[in-house]
Image: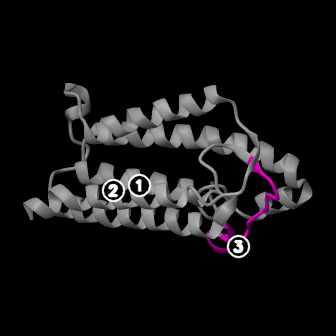
């Protein structure tokens, strides 16, 4: 169990990052992009969340446990992490060449409302939040919950900017879509 516990979830994340890097090259040309300062701010917060989860700096308050240590936390965390990353990958594949790392409008940008986008408007973010939550459950420390909160905050801010741009780009089509489909959690948020 020691090796499995030590390497399974990091292996999931490593595979995700490798896949994401490989897929980031086949995208449409960018027509309009968010300011660099916005992207750098988001990167800084995401890196802080990653440091909290995988490179813990000893702080007694964050080292405390919100979940007991045990095999069920590992397996629950591993399953939730795998499901979140898989959902994110599925959404990325479905989005195709319309995807971008930052908030952008692409040349020939299309409004995608099928597949995972029929369940939530931002399934990549839903998947990432779930994956961070799964990793936090595995670790069971307060630092993991803080990392999840940071990721949620960052992705929520990005989502809000994207929503504004999509409303301008797609008008009534996007308004209708956003009334029908929740942003992150089906039928809730």
User: In the picture, residue 159 is in which quadrant?
Assistant: top right
Residue 180 higher or lower than 107, as above or below: below
Q: Position of residue 62 (x, y in %)?
A: 26, 31
Q: Give me the C-alpha separation between circle 2 and circle 3.
A: 28 Å
Dot 2 or dot 3: first in sequence order is 2
- Which residue was labeled with disc 3? 114
Residue 170 covered by magenta stretch = no
Tell me whether circle 1 and circle 3 mark residues in contact (CB < 8 Å): no
Say which residue appears at 65% left-offset and 65% top-offset. 95
Q: Nearer the viewer, mark 1 or mark 3?
A: 1
Element at badge 1?
helix
Element at badge 2?
helix
Left or right: 34 as drawn, with respect to 48 = right
Say which residue appears at 29% left-offset and 63% top-offset. 78
Q: Give me the C-alpha separation between circle 1 and circle 3.
A: 25 Å
Dot 1 or dot 3: first in sequence order is 1
Magenta stretch: give its range: 105-118
* CA neighbours of label 2 inside 10 A, class few (<14), some (14 to 19), many (20+): few
Residue 95 badge: none
- Which residue was labeled with disc 1? 17
Tell me whether circle 1 and circle 2 mark residues in contact (CB < 8 Å): yes
**Residue farthest right in this picture:** 172
User: In the picture, residue 61 is in which quadrant?
Assistant: top left
Say which residue appears at 62% left-offset and 25% top-offset. 37
Q: Nearer the viewer, mark 2 or mark 3?
A: 2
Q: Nearer the viewer, residue 109 or 77?
A: 109
Q: Position of residue 132 (x, y in %)?
A: 39, 50
Tell me whether circle 2 and circle 3 mark residues in contact (CB < 8 Å): no
Element at badge 3?
loop
Q: How is the image coloured?
A: one colour
- Which residue was labeled with disc 2? 14
């Amino acid at each position: 169990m020691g090796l499995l516990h030590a390497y399974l979830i990091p292996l999931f994340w490593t595979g995700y990052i490798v896949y994401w890097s490989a897929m980031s090259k086949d995208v449409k040309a960018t027509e309009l992009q968010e300011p660099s300062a916005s992207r750098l701010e988001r990167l800084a917060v995401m890196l802080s969340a990653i440091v909290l989860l995988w490179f813990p700096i000893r702080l007694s308050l964050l080292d405390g446990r919100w979940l007991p240590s045990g095999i069920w936390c590992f397996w629950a965390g591993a399953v939730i992490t795998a499901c979140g990353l898989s959902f994110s990958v599925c959404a990325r594949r479905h989005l195709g060449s319309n995807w971008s790392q930052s908030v952008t409008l692409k040349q020939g940008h299309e409004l995608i409302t099928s597949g995972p986008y029929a369940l939530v408007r931002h399934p990549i973010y839903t998947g990432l939040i779930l994956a961070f939550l799964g990793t936090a459950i595995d670790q069971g420390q307060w630092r993991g919950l803080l990392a999840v909160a940071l990721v949620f905050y960052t992705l929520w801010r990005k989502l809000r900017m994207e929503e504004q741009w999509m409303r301008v780009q797609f008008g009534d089509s996007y308004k209708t879509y956003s009334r029908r489909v929740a942003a992150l959690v089906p039928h809730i948020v």
